[in-house]
Image (tube, helix red, strand yellow):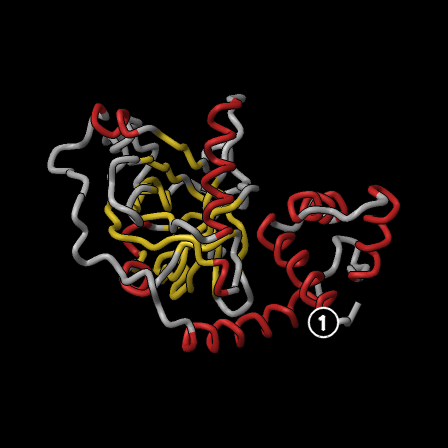
Amino acid sequence: MKKGKTDGDGSFRYFAPISFFEKSDAEEGQRRRFAGIASTESPDQEDEVVLQNGLAWDHFVTKGWFNDNHSRKTGGVVGYPTDVQFFGKGTRLPDGSIAPSNLHWTEGYLLEGVPAADDIWNVGQALKKAGGGRQLGQSIEGKILKRAGNNGEVIAQAKVTNVAITHCPVNADTSLGFLAKSLIETAVQPEGYTYQTDLPDAPEVHMDYKDWDAAEEHTLQEQEKEEKTLTTESGAALTLESLEDEAHNTAHKALNKAAAVSLVLRRLPHVSCATAGRVVDLALQLKLKGLL
């Protein structure tokens, strides 16, 4: 598993795998079931390790969401979790693969009729048909509660709050595989493991976002302050104007979000994909407000 971002306030984002399962004969709202690895104990690109027995998932299961590339907007909610399970290294996972290390496996549903969720589903299906090994990925988000190790490289305790589905994972092992129903029925599953079919305790999808929006708006404001102070490795300040200039010189046309993220990553190769996405989101917000 590779690290996406650790913020100064102790919050974190880490990438890990997930898989999607289509159930065409299921009732509306339960056709886009997905399950997969949410977090592993493998060292990330900066040699940090997340101890799986130190992760608290209660908040995520009862109040958390799957979002679109770390989006803080109401429309960025693309799914909800139904279960989280632990698997030890070497055990067989529900998709038939072997756990590379201690890990947590999540299950949930991708929403139907939500543009961002529809886009994720369509892209995942297209990537599956195209082949070539390119896939979507996911990133867990949360709050670090305790570190260990000589240099604090071990995350001993953390609270998982949300999981993002992203188009730019930093690890080839962080993938979203879209599988047909027949694969679910024939998959070799670990002893004692069963897929839930009725899900009586699944969170209500038609939620009131007022309270959620207020909390997320405060978080977004804090993130905007952070993005305005982003610097390059050489210490030169990254300005939104400089990104606009490069976009104009390289494209001479409006960039879609994926292209804009790629542009930021080329300009600042040492920032995470999640940070690049947030820079693009901030630039768009300021543009829409007439501040650019």
* Residue occupying image coordinates x 46% and y 76%: 215
* Relative side of 162 to 169, left or right: left
Question: Which of 97/287 is in front?
Answer: 287
Residue 36: percent from left, percent from top = 33, 40
Can residue 154 be seen in this snapshot? Answer: no
Secondary structure state at the residue bearing disc 1: loop
Please give the residue where the numbered disc 1 appears in the rendered image: 289
Query: Where does the C terminus fall, quadrant-wise?
Result: bottom right
Alpha-carbon neighbours of circle 1 within 10 Å: few (<14), some, or many (≥20)?
few
* Residue occupying image coordinates x 53% and y 52%: 69
Residue 288: percent from left, percent from top = 71, 67
* Residue occupying image coordinates x 47% and y 35%: 124
**Number of on-image labels:** 1
Q: Dividing the picture into quarters, in which one does residue 93 lie? A: top left
* Residue occupying image coordinates x 54% and y 21%: 132
Question: Which of 3/222 is in front?
Answer: 222
Query: Where does the N terminus fall, quadrant-wise?
Result: top left
Q: Amino acid at mark 1?
A: Lys
